[in-house]
Amino acid sequence: MPNITIDGYPIAYAEAGSGPPLLMIHGTLGDQRSWAGQMDAFGAKYHAMAVSLRHCWPGEWKDAGDFTIARHTADIAGFIKALGEGPVRLIGHSRGGHIAFRVAQHHPDLVSDLVLLEPGGELDETLGGAAPAGKQGAAFARGAALIGEGKTEEGLTVIAEHTGGPGAWAKRSEARKDVNRDNARTLLGQVNEQRKPYSRSEAEGIRIRTLLAGGDQSQPQFGVILDALEKAMPNATRVTIPKAAHSVQADNPAAFNAAVLNFLEKR
């Protein structure tokens, strides 16, 4: 498995194909395997890469206090620079979407096109949100507490149902559950990261061509974020993927892949 060392940590990734670079960032409780359904389709036209964020599988979880948006944003920026292939087409899902947003915000020269797939987090008051963190923060705190007590399945169920609705954990394939189990303890770091909410000025400042994507069966909180970003980001377009909840790229990979490739080819 290839890796690139960033600030002393080996960032592992999967890759397929050749051509212009395309980089994918997974969400909470995920890793590079979260993009299995995209590798062949994207690899047919691009040098497709799916990273595993610091401390996610196949890495080892260590409660070092560095499982934060800021640390992962720096890792992704460092990864792109070390790759040496120029600006990337950057795709982020959920928490990975938040990281992709921050990379585009702070390192616009490293991103040619941006895809935010139901980016996670909260909105601040300028985008119609409320501080402190709302339902997402509370749900993640409950899940992390259960995982910390050794009740891993119960904790993962809380997170799955918050993001995917009632019964979401039971509906997942064993392969997807195993990815979540392998990364369960990363939630202990994430829950304390004090993630900054999105603001209007930040969204308006990202002028990179952006695709905002969501599922037609997703929980309402993700649509609220997409609505706010769509209104604020000056170069954004929106697509809704049918027959998909929050794990859009896994729920309907064919439709998601087609939408992304169509967006990139229109550049």
Image (tube, rainbow, N blue to C red):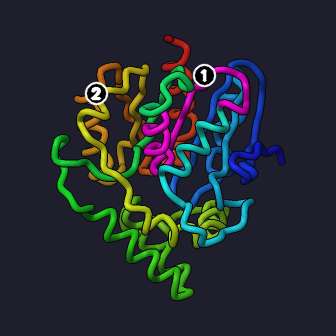
Q: Is residue 73 above or below residue 260?
A: below
Q: Is residue 49 above or below residue 7?
A: above
The label on residue 204 is: 2
Q: Mark 1 is on which residue type?
A: Pro
Q: Nearer the viewer, residue 214 or 13?
A: 13
Q: Nearer the viewer, residue 190 or 238?
A: 190
Q: Residues within 10 Å of mark 2 (few under 14, many from 20)?
A: some
Residue shown at 47%/73% (left/top)?
157
- Point out the residue furthest to the front here: 7
Residue shown at 55%/31% (left/top)?
90
Q: Secondary structure at mark 1?
A: loop
Q: Mark 2 is on which residue type?
A: Glu
Q: CA distance from mark 2 to mark 1?
A: 21 Å
Q: Was residue 123 drawn as part of the magenta stretch in this picture?
A: no
**Which x, y percent locates residue 231?**
23, 29
Q: Nearer the viewer, residue 257 or 14?
A: 14
The part of the chain drawn in magenta is: 81-103
Q: In the picture provided, is 170 more to the left or to the right than 123? A: right
Dot 2 or dot 1, earlier in sequence: 1
Q: Which residue is mark 1?
A: 87
> Which quarter of the picture shows residue 224?
top left
Residue shown at 59%/57% (left/top)?
30
Q: Nearer the viewer, residue 163 or 62?
A: 62
> Which quarter of the picture shows residue 200?
top left
The label on residue 98 is: none
**Which x, y percent locates residue 135?**
27, 64
Please count the marks in the image.
2
